Structures are given as structure tokens and as C-alpha cells.
Image (cartoon, rainbow, N blue to C red):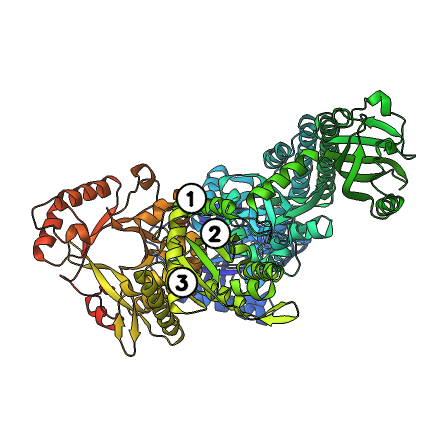
Amino acid sequence: MTSALPGSPLPPRAAATRIDDEELLRAVLNCLPLRVFVKDRDSTYLFFNRKMAEDLGVAPEALIGRNDLDFFPAELALRYREDDRRVREEKLTLSYEEPFRTHDGEGWILTTKTPWYTADGEVGGILGFFADITPHKRAEARYGTIIQTSRDAFVIVGSEGELCDVNEACCQLVGYTRDELLGMHLSEIEGQQGPAEIAENMQRLSRDGGGFFETQWRHRDGHRIAVEVSVRLLDDGGGMRFFAFVHDISARQRIELALAHKTAIYAMLSRINGAIVKLTDRQALFTEVCDIATRYGGFVLAWIGEEAKGRSENGRVHVLACSGDAKHQSYLETLVIHTSPELATGRGATGTAIREGRPVIMEHLQTRDESEPWHAEMRRCGLRSSMALPIGGGSFRGAFTVYAEEESYFDEDVVALLEEVAGDISFALAKMADTEQRLYAESQVALYAQVFANSSDGMIITDAANNIVAVNASFVDITGYTAAEVLGQNPRLLKSDRHDRQFYQDLWATLSAQGAWQGELWNRRKNGDIYPAWVTINLVRDTAGRVSNHFAVFSDLMQKKAAEELHRLKRFDALTGLPNQLMMEDRVGEAIIHATQHDRHVGVLFINLDHFHMVNDLFGHVAGDQVLNQSARRLLDVVGAQGTVSRFSGDFFVVALPDLNAASAINPVASALLASIAEPYAVSGQLINLSARIGIAVFPNDGKDFATLMKNADSALLNAKVGGKNSFRFFTKRMNEHSQRLLTIGDDLRRAVAERWLTLHYQPQVDLGSGKVVGVEALIRIDHPQRGLIPPGEFISVAEENGMIFTLGEWALDEACRQRRRWLDAGFDDFVVAVNVSAHQMARGDLPEIVARTLAGHRLDGRYLELEFTESSLMRNVGKSLSLMQQFHAMGVRLSIDDFGTGYSSLAYLKQFPLDKLKIDQSFVRHLDEQGSDALIVQAILALSHALGLTSIAEGVESLAQQNILRELGCCEMQGYLFSRPLTAAAVESLLPRRA
């Protein structure tokens, strides 16, 4: 090693390099333990001290006047002379190590050469020193061998944190070569500290002269290595540097961590077993197990899930209990797991464990393919390994799943202990299930005993030989026999002799083949009275399948049969078996009550067979009765379960159609009834053709009770008779014309949907404060090719009556959302599109699914949609309305009450709805600028909206005076012809706000 430092002329009288007193200088130099020599400018030796001469084995005087060529090989001598030249000319001090042979052998010396100066400041020659560093070099070689062969890493670190030297063990520890490491900064392999922390730590070590600490180093591939470092601050001739031995303690830490894990699992197992002993409720046990797992078992998250039953669930696993801090529990909030391997969510640890009935361990959770559906949440929560263990007992089928933040957490010992935990939980579940089954069986036995003792039906239990072993109190009441009189007897003592031998043979054959028989038996009481009984007999078999008992239940039908016959005679027609006038009156009365409560209609159809008297006259009354019976059957076939058919008298029938959406629903039924009567009748071998006419009255328009409806239906029937055979008429001309109009409009509606005549116009809604458009209301129109634009007032009521309101409503919603998506894509932002919802759409109950599907289909956020409901539709079924509104609110959809003030909403209910807006009906706005009560009503509505925190909007604003009054009263928004009529989507765009 050679180092060069700049030299400089010494001032006169500088004692270190100037020779003024030769004798004194000789004495001093001869006393030094160093080898000292002095050369002139030609590199001729002027002086050797005693130590130098002794090492060379010659007298000092013999060396004076000679040069290096006299003592050293030419090549070496010339190098020495070149060094002398550099020292003289460049005025440097040179220092280097070199081998040196003395009279007693070879060694190492540290040679230092520096210029000496004359009195006038000129370089007079070379002053040299030889220091014997042989012991140092030998020690260095010895320690170097030790360091290089050490299993621990060794590193020398400079004062700036640079790596000055490393051994092979260090290279292997961090995965770099020696050449790569030399010159690197310590922070490049330090895994815990950055450059600033390293500098601070080095300052502390400098103050203390060294130290001992643990840290982590970073391998070239990125993984961390736990190490302990022993460091000392030393000067090895190159300045103060840090000498450190670094010991890999990863294995030790793994052992310590595994021991800690094992200890924690033991504690967890002990406490869970304690909970199993203490708790008898399954849910409480699950909650306690999860809590123990995170509190004592060292897991950051633990949960127990159960596989849902039912094909529609696809093996969905539901969380029953969990434990962990808020961050880790949040992982479960959106967790979707199934047991089906066909689903991506069924291939994780929990689903596999339940499906295959085995523990499943998953390391490296954040990168494994099986856990891909949950990678994002696992990274957010720091979950790196998990184990799922199947648990079950009774009907329960699920898993206990635990998570750790460390990789490779689940070693052999931990797995074995967790399997023991799962086994203990399953044992507890099985024990709970057994206990539940035992308690249930005991309760059932007690229940059956109560039923047997207290039943109003008679009960008999016989043994395998059919001897009576038990009867209940009702048996005694019905038969008149006491229990003591019948025990040990055969039940045949009750025979009435009304049934022949074949009857009983068939009974026993059915009982033997099917295990049960049911039917009507005539039995005899103790007093000899014969009575009908409805009897059910069942076989009871033992575990081997042999018949052990017979169990019979019977009821006395005598009173029942008498009551049934009386009821039939009072309420049914004796000829046709149809309900009579009395029963029809009851049925219609019930239908009217239901229709009143649910805003429905009831149709009463009065039917008369044309010229029926001719059948009696020509073929006789027997043939006439046949025709009436056949007519009854035909009418029943048409009406089915949707109504009631009755015979009043003679050839008059009445059909009641309840729960109608609209009066127009009667038309197809009436036509079908007429067509059924028009079919030929086969009577006495001949075909007879008849026709009929029908008069129709409808609740509530044509009457509020049965008598009124029948009277008006009779009037309509008279009108039908004027119109010809096979015809029907509604009660009034107005109703009849209305029926025809409904048919025409209904046809137009169907064509409008099929041929795409439907269109939406949009009326802007304006903020009264800023004048900015904040919304548009979507209004449906029919663009008829002959009649032009048809407003909704002409066809919505028809659509509600014939059921097409659902098609129109879904179309309007879909088209409005599609247009709002287009406007968003075109840069029109910050306004809603309002769509009206009918009461019929709300009543059907599937509107939330339709809205959610439509929003998703157009990638539209719910906040851009506003649904308008009429006040009366919300109040029709408050509970159902509240449920629907909450579902819409959860989607982010804005909700508004349309035509507010025209209904009869309860404030107690109103404040429960998650509303955003009240729309003041235009009937109050129309005369707002005139003297009257409308201003007070509007003011009250606005006060209510402010109190409820709702936005208010007035519709039908057509004058500046109305606008100013609304603004003064505190109304938030308005819409009406004052600002704009309803416009097409293209025309309204000029009024819409664009995104900034």
C-alpha cells in the first residue's frame, strides 16, 4: 500500500528536517526504535542510525557514501531511486509497506520518505524511516484467516457508512459478491434503518466505542434476515472504522416464534375447552371461540361460518361469529365465500375445508391463485396466511378460520393443536345437537300426551294383535264406553254391520300395503245408536320393521253431516249445485269490502238464456234441467277461480268478478261466457242451439251494494236484449261508450309499444335562487302517425286499467336513464332526471329490482335519477311504501312526492319516508297571485318541507307574479311554461348545465 501526501518547504530552523547540530541529531536518531536513514539529492546515503545498521548487520560507517544499487537488486534499487525523485521534485511524503530481509530473517516494514530542507529552504535530500510491522502483518494474516473462514458475516464500515471490507460469509448472507458489496452504503443491505437512522446509530456507536444490537438485513432478492451485530470502533491504520461481526438469528427467531405460537395455541386450546364446558348455546360458544383465538391464540382475525342450506344459495358461507380489531373485521364485511368449486369464491381455504372435510392451510395469501378474489382486501388488511378447519355436529356444517399477518405461520405443532381445537368444537356441537334432540324428543312426548288426552277426536291404540291398550277421554264421550270396558278388547266391538266383509278386507289390505287408511265408517255406540265417523288408521312399526301398534283417530260426523246438509240447502241451488242468491250476496259483499280497501272494482254480470222456455215446451222439463246443468258447467269453465257463478232462478245466472283492476277487464270474460253458451247442446239425442245476453254493473260506479248492482245489471240486461242476441251491455250509455273507448285506446297503446311510437319530452326544473336548471321531468307521449302527439292524460288511466302501465313505466324509466347517460357522456352534469311512478307499479312490489337493473345497465349513479310518487299512492300501504322507499334511498335515488297537498298523507308517516323533495300541485299555484287561500296553503306546504329538511318545487308556474310569490315564500325550485314547455331531448340541451 502506498500513500502520497503533499510536502512543503520547512521554515528555517525547523528541527524535524534541518540538521544544525549533527552530533545531537545522531544521538537522537540512534535512540529511536525506528530504522532511520538520510540521503542527499543524488540518493547517496549520508546517515544510518544504529537500529538500521544492526538490521543490515554492518557498521554505520560502512554504509556512508553508498546508494541503493550497492545493497538491493537493480530493479528494486531503481524503484527506490524513482521514489526518491518524486519526494524531492514533488515535495511529497511517501509511505508504503514492503517485505524486508534482515540478518535474522524476512519481515515487513512500513517505509516512509519525506524531503529535508537546507537553511535556505531548498530540498537537501531524503529523510527516511523504516518501521517493523512484521508482528502486525502476521496478526493481520492470522485474523484474516479467522475472519474469512468464520461462519458469521464480518464487515468493516467506514465513517460515512460505506462498506470497506467483507468476508465470504457476508456475501452469502446477503447474496452479493465481494466486489459488488465494496463501496456500497450500509443502507443498501440494512432492512430496518434508512441512511439517516444509520448515521445517528453510528454516532452513538462512535461515542460508546462499539455496541451490540439486533436488526434486519435485506437479501438481494428482497427477503429480510434477522441478525445480531457486535461492533467495535478501531483504527487499523486507515483511520477510525467500524469492525462488526454479524450473526444470522433467523432460525433462532423462528424457533422462538414457533414456541410462542405453540404456547399461545395451548392457552387458546385450554380456554376454548373451558368455554365448551361452560356454554350450552351454540352462538355464544362461537363468539367465545373467536374472541379467545384473537385474544390468546395470537391470530389477528378469527371467524366461524356456516354453509347455507338450499340450492339457491350455491353453498354460500355466512359469517356467524368473528373477532379481531376494526381493520381486520372489516375484511369480512364484503366477504363472499362459497363451497362450490365451480365458483372462484369457492376455491379458497374456507370453502375447500367445508366441501372436502379437511383442514386447509394457505400461505402467501396475497399472491396465491386460489385466494385471488380477495387479494385486494387481504393486502389492505395485511393478511398473509390462514388456516380453515371444518367443524360440524348435528345439522351444522361449517368452518373455523384463523388468519395471521406472518408468512409460514402454521408449522406442524400449530396445525396439530388447531386440529385438536376444531375437534373439540365439533365434539361440543355434536353434544349440543344430542342435547337438543333429547330435549325435543321429551317435549314431543309431552306434547303428544297432551294431544292424546285433550283432543276432541276419539283415539284408540292397539297392540300388534289389535287388542286395545289405550283410549282417550273423547273416545269415552263419543262411544259411551269407559276405558276399563274396552281395554284388552278388539275394536270390532264398535261395528255397526253397515259394512260388508269386503269393505273390511279392502281396509286391511290398504292399511298393510300403505301403512295408513282413511275413510268414513259407520260405528255403533254403547247405547246401540249408529253414527258416521271419519276414521284415520296408521300402522306403527318397531326398529325391526314389525308392526307393533295400530293408532286410530276418529270424529263423530253426525252433527257435521246434518249441518252440512242444512248449509247446502240454504246456500246452494238444488238443481245445478251452484251457489244461490243468498251465497252470491255474501260473496259480492265480501268482494265490495276488499275492493273498497284496495281501490279495486267488482263486476256483476246478469245472464239470461234466450228463449229457454222453448226447450221446456218442446222437449220437456227434464231436458230443460239438462240444459241448465250444462250451462252451469260451461259458465264455471269460463270463470274458473277468478269469480263466482250462481243460479238465481229459472234461466237466469249471475257471475261475480271480484278484485278487478279496471272495468274493462270484464269485456273478455263476458265475450267468453256468450261464446260458451252459443255452443250446441246435446239433449235427448238432438243438438239445440241457444244464445244469451248479459247485463253488467260495476262497483263502485254503478252501485255500492249487491242490491243496487243487481238492479242496475238488470237494467243493462234489458238494454242488451234490445241490441240483439249474444250481446252484453254495461249499465249506462256512458259506461258502454267508455268501454268501447278503452278498447280503442288499448289497441293504440299496444301498437305504440310494438311500433315504437313512444317518446319522452323533458320539462326543465329551475332553482329559484340561481336560475340554474337543476333537473328535468321526463313526460311520456305517444307520437301517433295520424293523430300526432298524444299527451299522457289521454292514455295513462287506460294503461292502468288494462295492465299496460307496467310496460309504459319500465320503458319510460329505461329511456330516461339512457338519455341521462348520454348527457353525462356529453358533459352535461349536476342535474337529475325525474320519472313518474304509478301506484300500480308500487303495488306489484318488483320496482326496486327494475330500478337497480336499469341503473346498472346504463352505468348510471342513482343520484342522477329522481322518482316521483303521488301522495295517495304512498298512503295506500304505508308499510310497503316505506320498505320500497328505503330500498330506493339505499341506491342513492332521489325521492319526491308529486302533487303534494291533494292527498291525505299523515305527517307521522310522512316524516318516516326518506324523501328529498315535495312538489306543490299546480292547482294551488294556478291562482297563487289572486286573493284566496292558495297562498296560505302553499306557505304551509313550504313550512312543512323546510321543517322536514326537504327541497320544495312548484309545478305549473306560468307567470312572473307566481314566480316572485314563490320566491318570497321560500320555495326552492319551480317548473312550468314560464320557463319552458316540455321539450325533446335535443331541444332541452341548450338549457342544461355543462360540466365546468
Q: In which quarter of the image is the C terminus?
A: bottom left
* Of the image marks 3 and 1, the number of the one nearer the N terminus: 1
- Circle 3 sits in a helix, a strand or a loop, which is it? helix
The reply to whether discs 2 and 3 touch (Cβ–Cβ < 8 Å) is no
Q: Helix, strand, or loop for circle 2?
A: loop
Q: Is residue 680 above or below residue 95?
A: below
Question: What is the distance, in whole Å, between disc 1 and disc 2 at their CAs?
Answer: 94 Å
Evaluate whether residue 5 shows in this view. no
Q: Residue 490 carries which label?
A: none
Mark 2 → mark 3, Cα distance in angstroms: 88 Å
Q: Position of residue 905 (x, y in %)?
A: 30, 42
Q: Residue 750 in the image: state x and y as whole percent.
A: 39, 71
| Foreground pick, 412 / 36 | 412
Residue drawn 79% across the image and 37% down it: 522
Q: In this view, does 235 lie above or below 123?
A: above
Q: How packed is label 2: few (under 14 Cα within 10 Å), some, or many (20 or more)?
A: some
- Cα distance in 3D space between marks 3 and 1: 22 Å
Compared across the picture, whether 966 is left or right of 554 comes to left
Q: Seen from this angle, which residue lies furthest front?
A: 617
Q: In terms of secondary structure, where does tag 1 sit?
A: helix
Asked whether, in this view, residue 330 is left or right of residue 731, the answer is: right
Q: In this view, does 751 lie above or below 798?
A: below
Residue at mark 1: 593
Of callouts 1 and 2, the N-terminal one = 2
Please give the name of the residue rendered at 7% of the width and 49% of the height, measured from the top-left corner: 930
Q: Nearer the viewer, residue 971 or 460?
A: 460
User: From the image, which quarter does the N terminus lie in?
Assistant: bottom right
Residue designated by label 2: 161
Amino acid type assigned to the residue bearing label 1 in the image: Ile
Q: Residue furthest right?
A: 465
Three-letter amino acid code of the residue under disc 2 = Gly
Determine which quarter of the picture holds residue 117: bottom left
